[in-house]
Each structure stands twice: as structure tokens, then as C-alpha cells.
Image (cartoon, coloured by chain):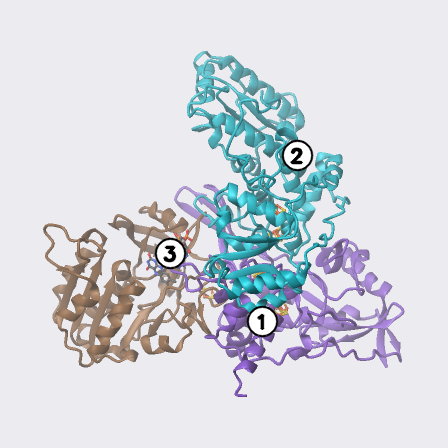
Chain colours: A brown, B purple, C cyan
Amino acid sequence: MRNIYRPELMQVIDARRQTPDVKSVRARFLDPAAGRDFSFRVGQFGIFSAFGYGESTFNICSSSNWRDHIEFCFRKTGRVTEALWEIDEGDTIGFRGPYGNWYPMEEWEGKNLIFLGGGIAMPPIRCAIWYALENRERFGEITIVYGARTVADLVYVDELDKWAAGPGVRVIRCVDPGGETPGWTGEIGFVPMVFERAGVPAGNSVALVIGPPVMIKYTLPVLDRMGIAPQDIYTSLENRMKCGLGKCGRCNAGECYVCKEGPVFTMEQLSRLPTDY
Amino acid sequence: MSRIITEAGLRELAEAWLRDGQAVAGPSEVKLGLIQYRPITAAARLLFDGFVHPANSIKEFFFPRHEPLYRYRLEGSRVVLEDCEPPAVKQLVFARPCDAAALPVLDHVFNWDCADEFYNRRREATTVVTLACSRYDDECFCTSVGLGPAAEQGADAVLFALGGGAFEVRPTTAKGDAAFADRTEESDRTATPFAGPPRRVALPRVEFDSPVWEDATLECLGCGACAYTCPTCHCFDIVDEGNAAGGMRAKNWDSCQFSLFTLHASGHNPRHAQPRRQRQRIYHKFHIYPEKFGPILCTGCGNCARQCPAGLGVLNVLKAIEASHAEHLPA
Amino acid sequence: MSETNGFEPKIVAYVCNWCTYLGADLAGTNRLEYPPNVRLIRLPCTGRIDFNLIVKAFEMSADAVLVSGCHPGDCHYTAGNYHARRRWMLFRPLLEALGFDLRRIHFTWISAAEGRKFQQVIAEITESARKLGPYRPYEANGESKWRPAGLPPPKRRSGDDASLRTTARELLAEGKAGVVIGRGERGPVLARKPEDADRLTWNGASKIALTAYLKRKEVRALGKPAIVAGPADLRALNVLEQESQIRREDIHVIAAEGPGAAPPDFSDLDALLQLEPGERMAYWAGEFDRCVKCYACRQACPLCYCERCIVDKNRPQAIDTSAHARGNFAWHITRAFHLAGRCVGCGACTRACPAGIDLRLLNQAAARAAERQFGYRAGADPKAEPLVGVYSLTDKEEFIG
Ligand SMILES: Cc1cc2nc3c(=O)[nH]c(=O)nc-3n(C[C@H](O)[C@H](O)[C@H](O)COP(=O)(O)OP(=O)(O)OC[C@H]3O[C@@H](n4cnc5c(N)ncnc54)[C@H](O)[C@@H]3O)c2cc1C
Ligand code: SF4
Ligand code: SF4
Ligand code: SF4
Ligand code: SF4
Ligand code: FES
């Protein structure tokens, strides 16, 4: 009997603390055949399990070009994430997926990319950034604005430098006022303001904005003033999910099952959805 | 000409299934005044008449309240998974038409895009025999949702009471035929159609942004009584139960009426107040589901009203919506 | 190891860190041998030993459980053991009503100096558990045919509907109340506009306790509530006040009768206790088999007001969320115990249950213990100290070894 709820087993090959409450994990399918058959598109998510504790939904934050393993990055907030916090190299976890839709990277070709992320929202953007960098010639200018409450809350800091070294890539990092450390060389301020100050040229651009609701709320008017249309602004929703298969009835916003028709939406699409997210 | 079976014949049919090691379920008196669909171990427990609707639904026999999905064993850092499967026995379920009619509706959600074989297996293994109604109560509104006492949807055979302990049998599928093969007699008695409840509501347009949610559903307490006794509600949770050595992952009923159902890790809750959760329930049934899959997600069984401790229920909310539309009509 | 068919009971002992644990340690250093059947679990204080742990131990196949701590007067935290003693006085009757075999549940005081007593207690418990044989919790030995008579129909209220409606209309019209919580023909009514007052009636339907609305965020947001209260509602208001959940001056009470002084009718409980423990458990196993975990019982209860109920907490997951025997027993033991000394006997839980489970009987088991042992009736007196939460030096302890 085909059991759609049964996860594939994965072996953790690296688990790394990114911040006091965020960890990133690299894992590889235990069954080599499952690994060979597996492919996904950046923006999709998986349902990861810590056996004995349950399942949690995370974005696959590695690039879809990396065939050897996948990565995810999570914040410790509850039962499952606390259990996952304890895992280490060699441990076994479960994975179901990939689920959901993805960033339309083909449609974005030839355009300038603006990535705006807040806090733990970096992982779902990171996969798109790596993908764009690995296919650098297909995209225009790349701007990345990444902010967190404090310096200690920034994730994947080591990669920010790598990205900044790429041709035509501008990386702006910022922390909320008061969150800076003495040696902090980045900006101080909230993502929307920092982004507006940066004066990024807006022509022929698409923006991917992921972060807490307040960040999104204040970022949209900025993008609007720059003339970026709602259908060119993308985000990824985090409605609570259980099955990821369009069955358990938990994730919907009106007639849209976010686990299947999402999590990636343009602002234009969101404006047509009931505000149930 | 028709085929008829006596009540004793029906019990004999049930006994035969039980003798065969198969499962039988149907309305039975659990305690004084409480009739529920229950698995039964003796055909004498089955009730064929004398009640309107059991206090629960037959969905439990297809989508159990607790369904182990697989077991896991932890051996050091190694994990061993073992699939669980629904029991291999066949089931014979006696049901009201409004319960049976929920099955073809539920088939959609459990099968779109990918198939939930736990549900499908049980569905395939089950023969559903409906007992056409000959009475109704104030909560029944099957005729308002396009069904009725003789609806055949989801049934493998329909029974019509002829009086005097006899039933006319109308098989509607091969499974139904097989169940009644050699068990009926030819007769010239046929059942007189029973009209069922009057139409109680003209299905109104359900709007997401409307004051009616606050006005008509504030009394809701956010329990799961309506969803758990509803034949069509199908939300579930996925949980782990076990310890350091092993355990299982299971699919358990859940309800959109619980306040934690959509609570995010950040503390944000898109449905932060009870009227919003009620809106989800009604909107899902009368807008989202038909929009996605065609049929509405309600068979008018009335259980949500019968079982609601706060006196609500879908019919009453629909009536309130209807009234609110009328209020807003130009004079 | 033993003569009884090789059955070796598993005994879980929850012991306090300051006395019994040291007593056990002393037994060890003095080479006083005691049966290896016991698994010691050290906790700060008997006052911290949640009964959920006892239930969990049985779920995980313990054959007997021991809770043991410092003697009265010796508690490291002054009074934790007194609190534990009082809770046990209510907890034991509840377990008894459920059909648990109380011979498997032990409580003792063992001090740090009493290594020998520890040795003896463990030997005795092990021996008695060995005689009792393996424990299979919640396993119904057949079906129970016993049925309670059930809740009596609600009493007719003596109030007059016309004046009730006038009062409610005026309260709403003059802005003295933001909502009037009452009963209507179909069920509870939250009257918010003066014209809604016409839907109120003294003898309307309600499967729930109207006071349950006082805990709801949506209702609180409406402004000062007025409540059309019957005797049980008045008792519930008293308990809510005792527990600092409400201030009486913040609620307008419309009542036609007092909180009621007649003793509750315990006849169903008496009949239940006439059954053998095994049949009692068979009865409950049959009842809980129908529980779908809809939590209507909780939602309908005036005193289940926790912001996040213990069943909704998952760190740790004290109660399995599945509606199987284990999960359901754990839920109902917890629910009833959390209401011990607090339940006002309104019957809402039982009326609300779509599965027809007579939950009232469990609440009564604790309620009667409260009456018998302490002369305490929940909700009778808003000035009384809540029963659980205080203790007395003279609390009975005949069950403590
Ligand atoms: C499509 C999608 C992608 C996500 N990507 C990431 C990611 O890359 N990194 C990351 O850290 N988090 C991500 N999340 C959020 C993440 O799923 C939850 O934080 C996580 O599941 C909490 O699990 P838990 O078991 O530890 O918490 P629980 O103990 O179950 O609950 C703790 C709190 O988290 C809430 N919660 C539980 N499950 C979810 C859920 N699935 N979604 C939202 N809130 C939940 C609960 O209501 C509760 O308040 C994503 C969510 C979605 C839907
Ligand atoms: S919503 Fe109510 S009437 Fe409709 S199927 Fe469910 S329980 Fe029956
Ligand atoms: S409508 Fe009734 S049964 Fe449904 S959640 Fe609300 S109070 Fe419970
Ligand atoms: S109301 Fe009844 S079915 Fe629902 S959780 Fe309580 S006891 Fe179980
Ligand atoms: S009888 Fe007791 S437990 Fe039940 S609802 Fe009333 S106060 Fe709560
Ligand atoms: S997560 Fe279950 S339906 Fe979307």
C-alpha cells in the first residue's frame, strides 16, 4: 500500500548553530535510490520529522542544483524544533516532500532581482539566491537586503560575504536600532527603511520579500513607490501545516490550499485571497 | 416487481458477515436515549427504525478518529519504519442516506493529486447499506442541499421500510447486489416515497467579509462536537506517540473550531477569534469545497445542530446568512 | 527469582529528593537489601509529584506506584507534603471511582534516617504487587451492563420572563452591560442589542454553563457582562471569584434564586461504587471508548478556564492527544482532578458531551470526598479558601504508610 504519510529517511551530515535559537542542517537520503530520484525547485518546502516528537514544515533552503544533499534551517520554537535542535551528524531524520509551488526562476530571467529578508526568513530566500548566483548570466542586478533584530540573530552570515563577492551583487545587511555590536559595519535600521535609503534602481525588477508581517507591511509601500507592480512582488506564506498534501484542512486561505497552491504568491495573488493568513 | 427482505433477514445478513470474521457497524442503542453508529458484535444490537439520526456519523469507519500511519523503532541513531495498514476485513455499514452521501464527497479530498490509501482501502472494503428515512426532526435539512430520504449517493444498496418488519431492497452497485444475493424475495410491494423535511433554507451566497459571522456565531464555544459528529468534516492532525525506543505516527481528527488549529509559531493566528473559525467551517463547506471539488461539503444531516452544546449548527448559521442578505436587499 | 510463576512486578517510586531519596541511599550504604523491582524517580518534593506521573507510570506498565516524601513538619519547602496529602485525599476517591485498584498505589513518609523503613516498604509493596499479579490498565474485562440513571432534567426556574427582558433591555440600552448572557429557546443567547433581550427566557435551553462565556475573549471584548444566573451559575461565580478569575463588581448578576443549599444527589455514584473495581473500569473503558476528544466537556465547563489546557501543551506531552483508551483515560482523569474541589455540579460537561458520557460521576467522586473529608462544597461560599491550594495540619492520612 502506498503510504503518502511515510517519510524517507535522511542522515544528518552537518548540523550547525546559526544563532542562539536557529540551526541549519544538511542531510542526505539514506536510500541512494531515493536520493537519485529526488529533485525539487527552489521555493518548495519539506516536512521534516524527529521521530517520537512529530513533524515540522521548513523550506528547503539549499539550491536545487545541489544534488548530493538538501539543507534546511529552523528556529527552535516548539516540540519538534526542540527535538531537532538536539540532532547531530549521523542522526536519522524523516523527510516528506518536496511540496508546494516554487519561485518562477525562469520567468525572472533577464530581470533584476531584489531579495528582502528579515530574521529567520533568510533560509527561504537563500535557495533562490544561490540558484541565481549559480546561473548568474541569466539574471540582471541582484540586491540583497537582510536584517535581523540583533547581530546575533543574523543567519548564514558567512555566506553573505560570498554573495557580495559575486558580480553585480549588492548585499546590504542591517540590524534594528539597538541590536548592533561595537564592531558592526552594516546598516542600522529596519529592512524597509534601509532598503529605501539604498536607492536601488527599480526598473525591470522582481522582488522576493519574506519576513514577519510587520516587515512585509512596511516594505510593500516602499516597493510601490519604486514602481514595482504587485505581480512582480513575491512572498512565501507560513500558514500552519500538517499534511502538506492538501488533505488535513489546516493551511487554507479561502479556497487556496497554501500547501499545494502556495506557499509562493505574488502580492497581486494575495490581494485576491481572503485574509486568512 | 421489487426485492424485499425482512428485518430478521437483515439481521441474518449481519450475522453472516460477523460469522465470516468481517466487521459490521450500524445504529445501535448505546445507552437509554443515545443512538450511535457503532461497530457491533451481535446483529441483535442493530436498530433499523425508531430514530431520526444517530448522534455521530459513519465517517469513523473510513476515516477513524485515530489512525496509526506507521511505527518507528529507534536503534541508536538508526530508525526503522514499519508501515501500518487498515485492517484487511470487509465492513458492512448500515447508514442513513445523509451519512452515505458524504462518502462520494469525501472521495475528492482524499484523492485529489495524491491518494490517501488508508481511506481508500477502507472505502473499497466497505459495503454501505442505507436505511431510507421515514421520519425527520427539526434539524434535518437534506432536502435543502439536494439530497433526501431516498438519496442513493454513496450507498451500495438502499433499504425502504415497507412496514410490518419488511424492507424493499434496491441495490445500486455490484457490491450491494452481492450483499443481498439470495437474501431477498420477489414481491409486488414497493415503498411509497417519503418526501422528507421541507426545504428549510435556500443555500445562500456565503461571503467571507460579512458582519453575519460576528452576529450569528459568537455563541460558539470552539469545541469539536460539530466537526466530530459531522459526516463530511475531515480535518486531521498528525502526531507522534512513543518514547525513546519507538512509537507511532498517527493521524487524529482535528477541528478548525479549536483555537490552536491555525496558531503560528510566531504567535500570529489568522483565525484569532471564534467567529473567524465559524466562518472557516461554513465557508469551507459552502464555498471552498464546491469551488475546488464540485459538491458542497454538507449533506444536511443536522448533526452539527443536534450536537452543538451552544445551540448553533450549520442550518442556523445559513438561515442567519439568508436573513442578512434579505436585510440588505433594497426595500 | 520468585515463586509466583516468575512474575516480577515493576514498581515505580516517585520520591522526594530531601527525605525518601536519602532514606533509600542510606538503605544502600547500610547494605539493607531490598527487591530490585523498584525504579526510583527523584523529584524535588511530594508536592511536585503530579498525579499525571502516576497515571503515566501505569500506562508504561508499572504494576504498582509509590509516592514518598518527608514526614509532616519536615518538608524542605515547609508544606509541600501537606499539599500532597490533601490532593491525595481527593485523588484516591477519583481513582477508586474509575476502578483503579488502590492496593497498587502507595503513599508513605520516609525520612533520610529511615533506611530500614524504606527497605521494608519496598519489600511489602513488591510482595503485594506480586500477589496482585500484572496490572493491565484500562483493559476492560468484558463489558459492563451498568448504567447510571443520569442527570435529572433541569429544574424549572421561578423567574418571570417579562421582567427579565425588561432588566436586560435596560442594561443594554443604558450601556450598563455590553452583553447579557442568558438562555433562549434554542440555546444560550449573548444579547448585545436591546432588542435581543426579547430572546431571553428563564427556562430556555442550554447544554452549557452560561458562566463558561465569561472566559471567552470574544465575550470579554463586549464590555461589562450581565449574566442570567441559576443556582449552579451562582456557585460557579463564587468559585471564579475565589480563584481571582472575576471580580463580582465587574459582573451584573440577574438571579431569581440563591446558589442552592440542598446536598447533591450522589445516588448514581453510590451505585457505581457498589460494582467491583474491575467492572467499574470496564464501565469507564466502555464509556471512554466513545470519547472522540472533542473537548465539548471542557468548553462547556465554567471552571475549565485555562488559557492553554494541559492537553494542548506539548512540552512535555503529558496526555496523549489520540482518542484511544490511554489518551482518553489520561484526559478524563486529568479533567476530573483539575476540577476536584472546584466542580459546582452544574452538569454542563455531561450535557454537552455528544457521546453521552456521564462525566459528572467522576467529578462527584472528588466532590463527595470534599464534602466528607472537609465539609467543603465548591461554590457555596465565595469567601472560603479554595480547597486545593490550602492544607490543614489535621488532614487525615490513614492511607499514608
Ligand atoms: C511552508 C512553510 C515553511 C516554513 N519554513 C520554515 C523554515 O524554513 N524555518 C523555520 O524555522 N520555520 C519554518 N516554518 C515554520 C515552522 O514550520 C514552525 O515554526 C514549526 O513547525 C514549529 O514546530 P514545532 O513542532 O517545534 O512547534 P510546536 O510545538 O508544534 O508549536 C510551537 C508553536 O509553533 C506553532 N506551529 C506549529 N507548527 C507550525 C507550522 N507548521 N507552521 C507555523 N507554526 C506552527 C504552534 O502553533 C505553536 O505556537 C515554515 C512553515 C511553513 C508553513
Ligand atoms: S455540516 Fe452539519 S448538517 Fe452538514 S453534514 Fe456536517 S453535521 Fe451534517
Ligand atoms: S458550533 Fe457548536 S459544536 Fe461547533 S464548535 Fe461551536 S459550540 Fe462546538
Ligand atoms: S465532550 Fe464527550 S466526547 Fe467530547 S471530549 Fe468530552 S467526554 Fe470526550
Ligand atoms: S459539572 Fe463540574 S466539571 Fe462538569 S461542567 Fe459543571 S463545573 Fe465543570
Ligand atoms: S497542510 Fe494539510 S491541507 Fe495543507
Asked where in the image residue C254 lies, by quadrant, the reply is bottom right
Q: Where is residue B247 in the image (x, y as percent from the top left)?
A: 50, 46
**Do marks 1 and 3 share a chain?**
yes
Label 2 belongs to which residue? C96
Give amino acid for label 2.
Glu
Residue lying at the far top in this picture: please name it: C30
Residue A151 image position (x, y, % from top left):
18, 53
Q: Residues within 10 Å of mark 1 (few under 14, many from 20)?
A: many
Alpha carbon separation for disc pair 3 and 2 = 40 Å
Of the numbered discs in the image, which one, if any, rests on residue B265?
3
Residue that badge 1 annotates: B317
Query: Is residue C179 found left or right of A63 in the rendered image?
Result: right
Task: Give percent across and percent down for residue A126.
Answer: 25, 63
Q: Is residue C349 left or right of residue B198?
A: left
Q: What residue is at 51 percent from the left and 31 percent from the top?
A: C390
Mark 3, ligand 1, within 8 Å: the answer is yes
Residue kind at label 1, given as amino acid type? Val
**Chain of the residue that carries numbered disc 2 in the rendered image:** C
